[in-house]
Image: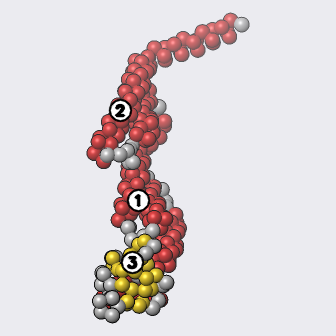
């Protein structure tokens, strides 16, 4: 019994001496963790406030909040929080002499800039995809609204896919096969969309060509009879013929130049 108590006392004495000898490093590590935790919380709050200010600037500049980044404020704040905290945890483990854990954290910190850069590229791509969609919606006025909306969605999706692939490659992920698959999928979608647009635009092109020849053959003020309508020509637009009839104004598609017989009525003073 006496040997057991002596052994226990010796172990407690040794442990106490080790704790006392390592107490400065332990206190320093705890201080680093406390400072890191406080700084991480402050920077997280500052990041969220900064995202809010950027939102306000975007709304004032663009006049709307379509590309607001406030929806990412919580994500960006959490990212900043854990990056700062991880840095101080690495410093604390180095102070305690935990070399294995310190080396692992150091490798993680070395790779962290690539991860952050990849996430920023993905975020910028998401915002840019919204801008591309709006540009397509604004400029593709020759298409019908459904076709214009579909083209805008395809352009937005393609921009977002490219940003995701570039961001993943920046992180060091192997995306070769994924990029090939995405390229094949994009080519297939664009090919189908081009076919749909060409089929949908066939009628528009026929009206455009027919109206061009109508403008050469007829003039405003003439009285004509075409496709069961008789009236005076009041306008020749880029795609249609506008007649003033007893029932009201009638807009006839320009393709009637090729499909229907057009009778030019003689004026009463010429009869």
Q: Is residue 84 left or right of residue 219?
A: right
Residue at image x 48%, y 36%?
A: 101
Q: Residue 193 carries which label?
A: none
Q: Which of marks 2 and 3 is in front?
A: 3
Up/down of 165 relative to 80, above or below: below
Q: Mark 3 points at which residue?
A: 243
Quadrant location of residue 6? top right
Q: Nearer the viewer, residue 162 or 106?
A: 162
Q: Residue furthest right?
A: 1
Residue 133's disc is 1
Q: Which of marks 3 and 1 is nearer the N terminus?
A: 1
Report x, y in % for residue 143: 42, 70
Based on the displayed image, in which of its 4 quarters is residue 170 positioned? Answer: bottom left
Q: Distance between the residues labelled 3 and 1?
A: 38 Å
Q: How crowded is mark 3: few (under 14 residues within 10 Å), some or many (20 or more)?
A: many
Question: In this rendering, which labeled residue sits more in front, label 2 or label 1?
Answer: 1
Residue receiving disc 2: 49
Please identify the quadrant where the N terminus is shown.
Answer: top right
Q: Is 130 located above or below residue 89 in the figure? A: below
Residue located at (38% from left, 58% from top): 134
Q: What element carries label 1?
A: helix
Residue 222 seen by the camera: yes
In 3D space, how far apart are the residues under numbered discs 2 and 1 (Cα atoms)? 28 Å
Q: Nearer the viewer, mark 3 or mark 1?
A: 3
Spatial CA span between label 2 and label 3: 62 Å
Query: Camera-side residue: 32 or 2?
Result: 32
Q: Please tell me which residue lies in front, 190 or 74.
A: 190
In the image, is residue 146 above or below residue 82? below
Circles 3 and 1, Cβ within 8 Å, touching? The answer is: no
Residue under the image location 49 percent in, 65 percent down: 146
Q: Is mark 2 on a helix, strand or loop?
A: helix
Instruction: Rate crowding at label 1 as few (under 14), some (14 to 19) or many (20 or more) other CA atoms within 10 Å.
Output: many
């Amino acid at each position: 019994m006496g040997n057991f108590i002596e052994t226990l006392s010796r172990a407690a004495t040794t442990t106490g001496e080790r704790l006392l000898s390592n107490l400065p490093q332990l206190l320093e590590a705890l201080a680093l963790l406390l400072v890191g935790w406080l700084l991480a919380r402050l920077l997280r709050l500052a990041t969220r406030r900064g995202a809010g200010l950027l939102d306000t600037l975007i709304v004032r500049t663009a006049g709307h909040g379509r590309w607001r980044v406030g929806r990412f404020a919580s994500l960006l704040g959490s990212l900043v929080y854990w990056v700062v905290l991880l840095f101080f945890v690495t410093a604390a483990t180095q102070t305690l002499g935990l070399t294995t854990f310190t080396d692992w954290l150091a490798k993680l910190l070395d790779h962290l800039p690539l991860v952050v850069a990849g996430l920023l590229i993905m975020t910028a791509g998401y915002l840019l995809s919204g801008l591309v969609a709006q540009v397509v919606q604004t400029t593709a006025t020759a298409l019908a609204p459904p076709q214009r909306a579909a083209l805008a969605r395809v352009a937005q999706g393609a921009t977002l896919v490219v940003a995701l692939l570039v961001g993943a490659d920046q992180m060091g992920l192997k995306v070769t096969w994924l990029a090939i698959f995405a390229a094949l999928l994009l080519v297939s979608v664009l090919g189908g969309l081009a076919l749909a647009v060409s089929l949908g635009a066939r009628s528009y092109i026929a009206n455009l060509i027919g109206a061009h020849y109508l403008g050469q053959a007829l003039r405003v003020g003439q009285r004509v009879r075409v496709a069961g309508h008789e009236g005076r020509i009041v306008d020749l637009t880029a795609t249609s013929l506008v007649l003033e009839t007893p029932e009201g104004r009638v807009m006839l598609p320009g393709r009637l130049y090729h499909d229907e017989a057009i009778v030019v009525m003689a004026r009463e003073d010429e009869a």
